[in-house]
Amino acid sequence: MGYKVVVVGATGNVGKEMLSILAEREFPVDEIVALASRKSLGTELSFGDRTLKTKDLDTFDFTGWDIALFAIGSDATKIYAPRAAASGCVVIDNSSLYRYDHDVPLVVPEVNAEAVDGYKKRMIIANPNCSTAQMVVALKPLHDRAKIKRVVVSTYQSVSGTGKEAMDELWNQTKGLFVIGQDVAPSVYPKQIAFNVIPHIDVFLDSGDTKEEWKMVAETKKILDSSIKVSATCVRVPVFVGHSESINIETEDFLDWEEATEILREAPGVLVIDKREAGGYMTPVEAAGEDATYVSRIRQDNTIENGLNFWCVSDNLRKGAALNAVQIAEVLGKRCLKKG
């Protein structure tokens, strides 16, 4: 006996990935339905060798369904997630709406799988921000060994993190720069994204940080350890898929870069690509479509007593969103629901 699964927002980038990954990983599905807004009603989507037609989210009854993977914005989630939860369907939410709610587990399975046990308080589990998810997968094994005190991270985030319109804007601006009279003015972003980098993701806060930067701080503390100090600078770059991060950590105990490399090689969800030669590292182009969190450029930071630097790359639509949600569903099934 398997699960009755709902994918909400199935026509978006993340929703499509959720369907693909559920099929790829052979999640034990007895029945599955793809939901979208009324304007997308009847859109055909692939699920393994099957074709699904989207149904109307607004009129859908979640009663009798086991798990709902949500990939819609916070405003819509605020309406439909409580409706699903009240019907006894466990919501795994990819929006930011519930991430900072004390009664809602925020889960990265390689890091804090046991946190799913708290789902019953609200019948909701939150998926973290894409940039946080890949970082804590790499931090967890190092933290277990040497206790991380401080993290300084600079991100290089792809436009797919904003959505399809942003991907279109990058494509059209890039083409337009080579054809006179076909230039495309910024619309999704405040400045040109083609051949540029923008040190601004989400809204600015009174502190001078952006909300994306604040998210990385708050989520790392909730998922990994509340005592860790985190400083983040988040930057949008002209890459279609795949987030990259330059990460510096300071630990309580000394950790040699060679030992750190071996620890990361054994860590769940991590692949180390680090040859210390031209091309001996991972880039977002290569990470696109892959499940792993890739770590490269591992080296000592000799400017502090116990410091390490490394480079971290992952597909933000997969580990940063859809894959992590499906992994949460897998853990929820094994630990709590116990079907399939």
Image: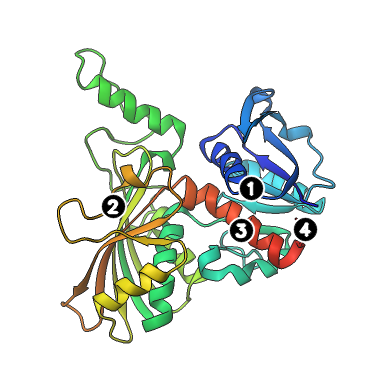
Q: Which residue is under mark 3?
A: 328
Q: Distance between the residues labelled 3 and 2?
A: 26 Å
Q: Residue at x 47, y 66 (%)?
A: 268
Q: How far apart are marks 4 and 1 (CA)?
A: 14 Å
Q: Which residue is under mark 1?
A: 26
Secondary element type, mark 2? loop
Q: Distance between the residues labelled 2 and 1?
A: 28 Å
Q: Residue at x 82, y 50 (%)?
A: 87
Q: Which residue is under mark 2?
A: 282
Q: Which residue is under mark 4?
A: 339
Q: Can residue 55 be seen in this view?
A: yes
**Which numbered disc flags the more N-terminal residue, 3 or 2?**
2
Amino acid at circle 4: Lys
**Which numbered disc flags the more N-terminal residue, 2 or 4?**
2
Amino acid at circle 1: Glu
Query: Do the residues under discs 2 and 1 have CB atoms within 8 angstroms?
Result: no
> Which of the image's four quarters has the C terminus?
bottom right
Amino acid at circle 3: Ile
Q: Distance between the residues labelled 2 and 4?
A: 38 Å
Q: Tell me, for residue 11, which label it has, or none.
A: none
**Which numbered disc flags the more N-terminal residue, 3 or 4?**
3
Secondary element type, mark 4? loop
Q: Distance between the residues labelled 3 and 4?
A: 15 Å
Percent across and percent down for residue 127 are 56, 56
Foreground tag (4 vs 1) = 1
Query: Do the residues under discs 4 and 1 have CB atoms within 8 angstroms?
Result: no
Percent across and percent down for residue 183 are 25, 19
